[in-house]
Amino acid sequence: MNQLKEALDTLKDTGVRITPQRHAILEYLINSMSHPTADEIYKALEGKFPNMSVATVYNNLRVFREVGLVKELTFGDASSRFDFITTHHYHVICQQCGKIVDFHYPGLDEVEHLASHVTGFKVDNHRMEIYGICPDCTGKEVH
Amino acid sequence: MNQLKEALDTLKDTGVRITPQRHAILEYLINSMSHPTADEIYKALEGKFPNMSVATVYNNLRVFREVGLVKELTFGDASSRFDFITTHHYHVICQQCGKIVDFHYPGLDEVEHLASHVTGFKVDNHRMEIYGICPDCTGKEVH
DNA sequence: TTATTAGATTATAATTGTTATAATTAGTTT
DNA sequence: AAACTAATTATAACAATTATAATCTAATAA
């Protein structure tokens, strides 16, 4: 249940050193229910680590991705977003304000199978984003 | 059936001028079965328009997106890709060589409905990418 | 056809997100 | 505690995209 503890164990098991910066970045990713960019993480931890470099944030996000703790997401906008991997879910994105909400739904296995059959790919996984207008923005659409 | 002609009509209808550059970019998007980046388009048209600026490519891709002729796609890699909109389809992407193959499949309406119900969003559309290893790369995976 | 004008293109500079490099620092192991 | 290796920092480099200002041109109508 303690996601942070499990994540730290994963790092230990894969031989990745646990530094204060890593600890803080992981903690931030787990606790933030948003899907932060590297820069948001950097700014959020500025108080605790005044000397931390942006490179450290990027390096560690890459490490976390490589050991499977974190997923890197690219939407239409400029920078990548990072999502601590818990259970399988999709993202619903507001086209007005950019809010991202998690949407839990059983994986679309049959779609994967069909895609594999039609294209000849050995299919691994998929991602899906659903776009719309969030409740807060309904009625405020720009045309 | 003539996609280019229809696209040009769309531009005319929305009051967007048809310049030689626009014509060429549109034509290239329609004929290339790939999903080119802005830079690929720029390089491909270098011969015909030696003086064309990259900014022109970007500007026009934005215009095409705004009038609904083109979809901008971001995958994991650095730059956006652009897809002339025809019928509804998904993309199957090779994790080894980056090849992108179209995969036609009826839209996942029920997923949209459920997402709308659960999140309260007014859902508009969705996108999905399926990742795997293409036939050419099978057996050549890097670990 | 020509003149007009709003909009498009060009060339360039600026901006932004991300990665590479080299020196320093700090976990971990002996 | 010493040694070794990996991580962090600071900085520079890079690449994709956007902004700006000057020039040019497609569409329109006289």
Image (cartoon, coloured by chain):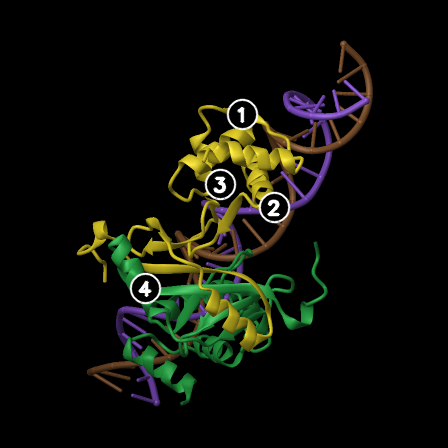
Chain colours: A yellow, B green, C purple, D brown
Residue bearing the label numbered 3: A38
Secondary structure state at the residue bearing disc 2? helix
Q: Residue pushed farthest front?
A: A1
Q: Which of marks 2 and 3 is nearer the N terminus?
A: 3
What residue is disc 1 on? A51
Residue at 27%, 59% in the rendered image? B116
Question: Which is nearer the N-term, disc 3 or disc 1?
Answer: 3
Q: Which of B21 and B44 is in front in this view?
A: B44
State the image coordinates of residue B26 (x, y, percent, origin top left).
45, 77
Residue B124 seen in render: no
Q: Do the residues labelled 1 and 4 touch (CB within 8 Å)?
A: no
Residue B94, percent from left and from top: 60, 65
Return the chain for callout 3. A
Q: Which amino acid does label 3 sit on?
A: Ala
Q: What element carries label 4?
A: helix
Q: Distance between the residues labelled 1 and 2?
A: 25 Å
Q: Nearer the viewer, residue C22 or B83?
A: B83
Rendering coords of residue A96 (x, y %): 28, 54
B1 vs A76: above or below: below
Q: Mark 4 points at which residue?
A: B112
